[in-house]
Amino acid sequence: MTLTRRQRDLLVRACWTVSLMVVAIPFVFPFLWMISSGLKGASEIFGQPSLIPRSFQWQNYVDVFTYQPFARQYFNSLYIALTVTGLTLVVASLAGYALARMRFAGAGLLMLFLVSALMVPEEVTIIPNFFLIRWMGVMDTHVPLILLPVFGSQGVVATFLMRQYFLAIPKELEEAGKMDGLSRLGIWWRIALPMSRPALAAVAIITFLHSWNLFLEPLVFLSSLKLFTLPLALSNFTDPYGMPLWHLQLAATSLAVVPILVVYVIAQRQIIESFALSGVKG
């Protein structure tokens, strides 16, 4: 039996689809198990493991909000992530444009220093940051959770991405802006930023996810329960003996991943395009 070219293409596509579905199972299964376990009783999660609960315990999602101020902690993570994202976009776009277009002594050395800082783990800088925050008198507040990501390693990543994108913008457009009387700030606002929307979208997504998932910094700088962010709140679902309440913890985790899923579904293409375009020049 001879297959036509169209049939062969359909067969190859079907084989690829099935293969990718098989490969995706190890990645999807933990997520499905998390959602399933969040709907189980405490004894059922490890007593008789199964993907489908014997009885759906919807009460777990109610208990999540009564066990601790989970709604307040959810709001804390949300507003901190949005604030960090907004500030990072402003700072990174300004710094990236300056490094890409403005010529000044030591510009190359400064960029090398910034990129080299990415090789330093956050665990190494947490101690000097702790003393700095304590000296500033803002311990047990959300200030360090906003300032450190903006001016730390995540801000450097954002600056690098924006610089690479700005390098790909034709200089002729800026020269035309100068002829129209625009200043450097005007060129950045009216020409550079509108043309860098893919990079801005990618930086916003990456920054939001990084801030949303922060655990070490909140653990070090926060002590009040009402100021906790979600990563700390998830580890706080324990019984009086300090043992995890897995059914509540997994139900809360299922709620915590909702913004991340929304971000990825809406803008995953922007991330890919931005990384591809960031290597065009420079």
Image (tube, rainbow, N blue to C red):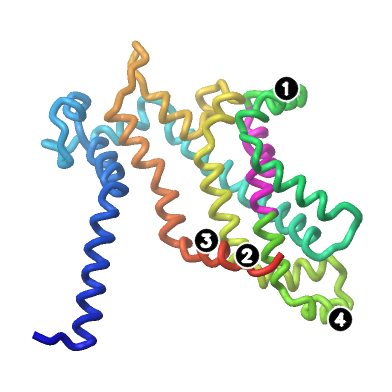
Mark 3 touches mark 1? (CB < 8 Å): no
Q: 200 left or right of 243?
A: right
Question: For the residues carrying marks 4 and 2, which lies nearer the camera in this image?
Answer: 2
Q: Is residue 61 above or below residue 196?
A: above
The residue at 56%/59% (across/down) is 202
Which residue position holds label 4? 180
Say which of 78 and 161 sits in front.
161
Mark 1 to mark 2 CA distance (whole Å): 38 Å
Mark 1 touches mark 4? (CB < 8 Å): no
Mark 1 touches mark 2? (CB < 8 Å): no
Which residue position holds label 3? 271
Whichever of callouts 1 and 2 sits on the residue coming sooner in the sequence is: 1
Residue 42: percent from left, percent from top: 22, 25
Tag 3: amino acid:
Ile
Mark 4 touches mark 2? (CB < 8 Å): no
The residue at 84%/78% (across/down) is 175
Mark 1 to mark 4 CA distance (whole Å): 49 Å
Tag 2: amino acid:
Gly
Mark 4 touches mark 3? (CB < 8 Å): no
The residue at 55%/49% (across/down) is 208
Secondary structure at badge 1 equals helix
- Near mark 4 (Cα within 10 A), the count class, few <14, some 14-19 or many ≥20, is few
Residue 18 sits inside the magenta stretch: no
Tag 4: amino acid:
Asp
Q: Tally the marks.
A: 4
The quarter of the image holding the C terminus is bottom right
Q: Residue furthest top?
A: 241
Whichever of callouts 1 and 4 sits on the residue coming sooner in the sequence is: 1
Residue 2: percent from left, percent from top: 12, 87
Whichever of callouts 3 and 1 sits on the residue coming sooner in the sequence is: 1
- Near mark 2 (Cα within 10 A), the count class, few <14, some 14-19 or many ≥20, is few
Q: Which mark is residue 131?
A: 1
